Image (cartoon, rainbow, N blue to C red):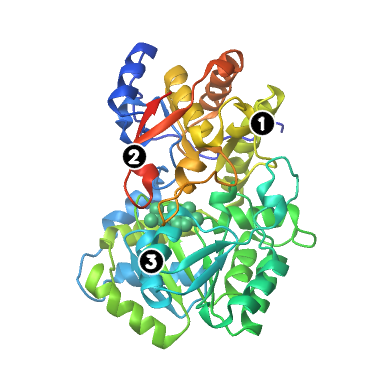
Amino acid sequence: MKTIIEPFRIKSVEPIRMTTREERQRLLEEAHFNMFALHSDDVLIDLLTDSGTGAMSSAQWAAMMRGDESYAGSPSFYRFEAAVKNLAPFKHVIPTHQGRAAEDILFSIFGGPGRNIPSNTHFDTTRGNIESSGAMGHDLVIAEGNDPASLHPFKGNMDLARLEAYLQEHRDSVPCVMLTITNNAGGGQPVSLENIRGVSALAKRHNKPFFIDGCRFAENAWFIKQREPGQQDRSILEIVRDCFTCADGMTMSAKKDAFGNIGGWLALNDDELAEQARTHLIRTEGFPTYGGLAGRDLDALAQGLSEIVDENYLHYRIRTNEYIIERLDALGVPVVKPAGGHAVFVDARKWLEHIPPLEYPGQALAVALYELGGIRGCEIGTVMFGAHPDGSEAPAAMDLVRLAIPRRTYTQSHADYIIEVFEELVDIKDSLKGFRISRQPKLMRHFTCSFERL
Ligand SMILES: *Cc1c(COP(=O)(O)O)cnc(C)c1O
């Protein structure tokens, strides 16, 4: 069949509150044009993030009732731990309330002034946690990863030659090597199994522990199965296990590929590091058998982890992105190709070439999508990455708008609506104006800064 149907029926629905364009103009001004400041019930289609915004299954809701809220030794924890180890066979699994809490713990151990931490591309919270420890994060993605038009099948790959040179140059100041799968900040692009193995071998040779930021491990495995020679006949589960077996540990946001509305974990093999991590966990999150989570959350995640590796789900999910991207491409909208896992990325710098990077073309496009169609996307560009710890500012590698697709939440007609809003934008895009930032915090400014339209 040509149509890939949503592989689920809908048992419970949430109404969408309709708004007018005039209403949205007023709401934008009240929010100082920051998408994060909008109330979500003022949004028609919320593509701000795929993080924690997915729909849980009936089996997950049922699992929540099994949740055991014991302080220590809850069976919910052991079900969660077994579900994680089934996919990622690390010795220690430490639950946290989100991925960033796992990062905070990891960099409380590996961070600190003078340290250098490489990755393909660090996600913003990862970079924030590295930098607030006093360390520096460096992005060593392959050159194709910074070219929105390149059709390389694994644009999230680490540049192994650059990593080798980096490890030579920084030697003793590198506490660990990281790799983000899929590469969220680089367009949700996948990393090949071959590249994961390559990073692992290099890290081993230089005696550095290797950690995977595994937020979208299932989507990454789907791409490996589709695109990597020799992987077509293998199950997603086998591929996922192969990926994690290469590493010494992982950080995870369970709000992504675990179908959770909240949650995360740090997993690792080293006993001594695990003890340090658990000590930090007890101080900041909670006792090691619940971390930052309720027992019911742990059970929902345990169930979610068994659903996320379902190939029918992954097929439908990735196809939705491809569908939107093919149609935007046909409209002449520059999109990051090939389709990534969790989102559609529009190259705002290229499309709105009359707006220079330091006037934030991504922000201008995000504002226009909301004003015109009530769609909320997220700038991933100079607003998010342009400010440096020393107070200076420079254009980011790319100025993208990310339309992140929540898991199992929207349907085909929502996708068609998104495409229609872009059709309208094609005619007026040259009249869009840039922005300036009128107020910003020191770190991770995109969440809270205020904008003024130029
Ligand atoms: C979401 C995300 C994180 C942070 O996880 P939270 O649960 O939001 O704290 C880290 N890395 C990547 C790649 C992510 O997508």
Q: Give the CA separation, mark 1 to mark 2.
A: 27 Å
* Secondary structure under the numbered disc 2 in the rendered image: loop
The answer to whether the beta carbon of the residue marked 1 is less than 8 Å from any atom of ligand 1 is no
In the rendered view, would you say 36 is above or below 291? Answer: above
* Secondary structure under the numbered disc 3 in the rendered image: helix
**Residue 258 can be seen in this image:** no
The circle drawn on residue 359 is none
Image quarter for ligand 1 equals: bottom left
Q: Quadrant of the C terminus?
A: top left
Q: Residues within 10 Å of mark 2 (few under 14, many from 20)?
A: some
The answer to whether the beta carbon of the residue marked 3 is less than 8 Å from any atom of ligand 1 is yes
The circle drawn on residue 334 is 1
Please, what is the three-letter code of the amino acid marked with disc 1? Answer: Pro
Identify the mark nearer the N-term, 3 or 2: 3
> Of circles 1 and 2, which is in front?
2
**Which residue position is annotated with label 3?**
102
324 relative to 20 in the view: left or right: right
Mark count:
3
Q: Which residue is nearer to you in this view: 418 or 71? A: 418
> Of circles 3 and 2, which is in front?
2
> Of circles 1 and 3, which is in front?
1
Please, what is the three-letter code of the amino acid marked with disc 2? Answer: Cys
Identify the mark nearer the N-term, 1 or 2: 1
Return the x and y of residue 59 as percentages of the image width and height: 39, 51
**Which residue position is annotated with label 2?**
449
Return the x and y of residue 364 as percentages of the image width and height: 48, 27
* Secondary structure under the numbered disc 1 in the rendered image: loop
